[in-house]
Image (spheres, grey):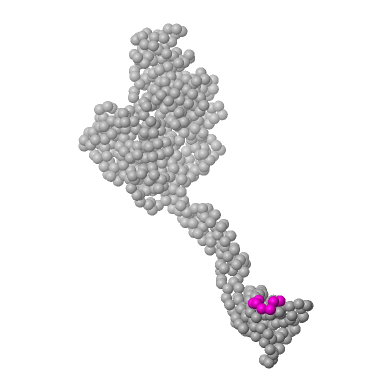
Amino acid sequence: MNCPGCGANVAFRSERAPYSVCSSCGQMLIRREFNLDLLGQVAECQPDGTLLQVGTRGQNLTRGFTVAGRVQLRYGDGFWNEWFLLYDDGSEGWLGEAMGQYFLSSRVGASKVPTKLSSPPELGQLLTLDDQSYAVLDIKTVEVASFEGELPSLATVGVPYVSVDLRGSEGNGLTIDYQEQPPTAYQGRWTDFRNLVFQNLRDDVSPEFSVDSSQIRSVSCHGCGAPFELVIGPASRTYVCQYCGCAMDSSRPEVVSLGEVVDRAQTLAASATLKLGMEVHLSEGAFRLIGFCESSTRIDGQSYFWKEYLLYHRCHGYRWLSQTEYHFTLFRQLHGVPQAYGGAPKAQLNTSSLRYQGDRYRHFQTSLVTTERVVGEFYWRLSQGERSQSWDFISPPYMLSASVTETDITWSQGRYVSHEELGRMIPDLEKLKTSWSPGANQPNPHQPKKYLPVFVGAAVLAYGLVSSGALLAKEQVVWQQDRVPFRASGLVAEAALKSVSGSLRLDVEIPDLKERFVELKATLTPTQSGATGVGSLRLGNPRKEGTVRGATFLTQLPNSPGQFRIEALTGPPVGPIPLLRETPNQTLPSTQQERFHLNFKLTQLAPGPGYGSLFFALLLIASAPLAAAAMANDFEKRRWAESDYG
């Protein structure tokens, strides 16, 4: 078909979309069977930095789609886009684009929209549609600024109406437009740029680059003349000079001065740890630091300050890097809403715990946040003293934060960033100082559970050491005698021992035993009350020469002095062994012929593997985990001392 206004060819991609804007002359056209009628001139869509255009290809999970048209909506000082999609299977849908987030949706049948939604709900209200629960997070007045391409219905330009955004706990969403009655509802889910697999974007610049070079504008400050760059293009609303603090309206091509809407911007710029223009490497790509602000809250009469750095990527939108002292947390806006007790989305904010992606978050602090000073470029119209209420919930290393104003509730998730990780994100960053106090969502560095494998392994080792007697005490020789002559059966040696206990080991060595056996009996009789320790040993050597060794034990001895005696019986190496005679007072005549000699060594053994010794060993080994547990408890006490519960 040809445009009645300019004659250009107008191709309709959808059989069900009767409206189209001629790309050549900007006339609004309506298709009536095989003819096109003019409906009037349509203003061009305002530049807003979008990468999408009519004809862009994308993918919703496994379903491919083509962008057929756009409705550009205006709210306050900003814009967002609603792209009309034609799926390859013939169905239709919409793709909302705002601040680097994307909402894939389709229109809900009028019969499914509850009658209670005939008027806008309240902020924080919980609603149910198709057995799915949604929390009302945003209520704003919008109007159609312009449109292009093919559309399923005629959009009315410049007529304000209320738009309500709701979100569920699993990234599902619902938008209700009160442009007409009954209201129109669109149901779908939120997703990221990289999940949509776009093709045929507005330019060919790789999404890996944070800023398109053609988008950057070089401008001079109206206050001091210092040069600076505007990097977020048409989305830019305010720029505050880091040298003189002059604020400028960056949404207009001529960059009109707004005067000094904030004070001491130079001091903030000089004290900031991170500087404008730095690249911060995240998993999605390299983001550029385009601005930062200093915020404060007042608790019990004392003011607390922290800095927030605004990061920008042309495809992935915005991130915030928060700095409290030298603790850093990286925030991004959530697709879904955390769950309250029972599984429903958290609609009404209170101090009860909540859950998100399987983790439990405890309420940490509620505060009134004031914007004190700002530097750099921002996507909203800045005014000094802006205030919002902040609700923070923690599950280290994560934090969930809800920022509440009169018209919206914005949920963000932050993750604690260590100095080592921050150094990888910003390679040229100078070494940072260590904070003296715990961070709100800083992981506890003293976790006893990390010592558990070491403790188990050491316990096994300790038991072995205690069992062998090597851990708690050493063996000690209490009596020794060498070259004791042995001539006949009877008493061989005796000694008075000062104090022994537990177990003794008697080592015997006969260097010149020849064709004989020797049976020894060792006894230790305690001077005080207690059982007598007895040990016996039989040594023999059928050969003509050689050294013979052996040992016997005396056990369960009381802690007492005692009389130690060794008696012996000798005989040939074959035949039955005669009984050992009791000869306590027998002495051997010196005239008898020597047979051989004996070497004796009596050793006091270390205490055995009793439960007391094992407990003592385990107590020593557990000292590190116990100390870690004490330090971990102290760390948590100091952390929560900074909360509403301190």
**Which quadrant, please, contains the N terminus?**
top left
Residue 185: x %, y % from top left: 48, 23
Front one among 332 and 540:
540
Relative to 56, residue 309 above or below? below
Q: For the view shown, which residue lies furthest in the right direction?
A: 576
Residue 158 figure quarter: top left
Relative to 240, residue 22 above or below? above
Residue 451: x %, y % from top left: 52, 55
Relative to 16, residue 501 above or below? below
Seen at 71% across and 86% down, the residue is: 488
Can residue 480 be seen here?
yes
Specify the segment rendered in magenta.
Answer: 541-548
Residue 608 figure quarter: bottom right
Seen at 53% across and 60% down, the residue is: 622
Can residue 407 be seen here?
no
Residue 522: x %, y % from top left: 68, 79
Front one among 139 and 175:
175
Seen at 31% across and 38% down, the residue is: 277
Q: For the view shown, which residue lies furthest in the left direction?
A: 224
Q: Is residue 24 left or right of residue 526?
A: left
Residue 457 figure quarter: bottom right
Seen at 38% across and 46% down, the residue is: 423
Q: Is residue 280 left or right of residue 474?
A: left
- Label the magenta part by its dominant secondary structure: loop
Q: Is residue 177 left or right of residue 294?
A: right
Relative to 412, residue 152 above or below? above
Q: For the view shown, which residue lies furthest in the front direction?
A: 544
Residue 13: x %, y % from top left: 45, 16
Q: Is residue 619 magenta?
A: no
Front one among 361 and 101:
101
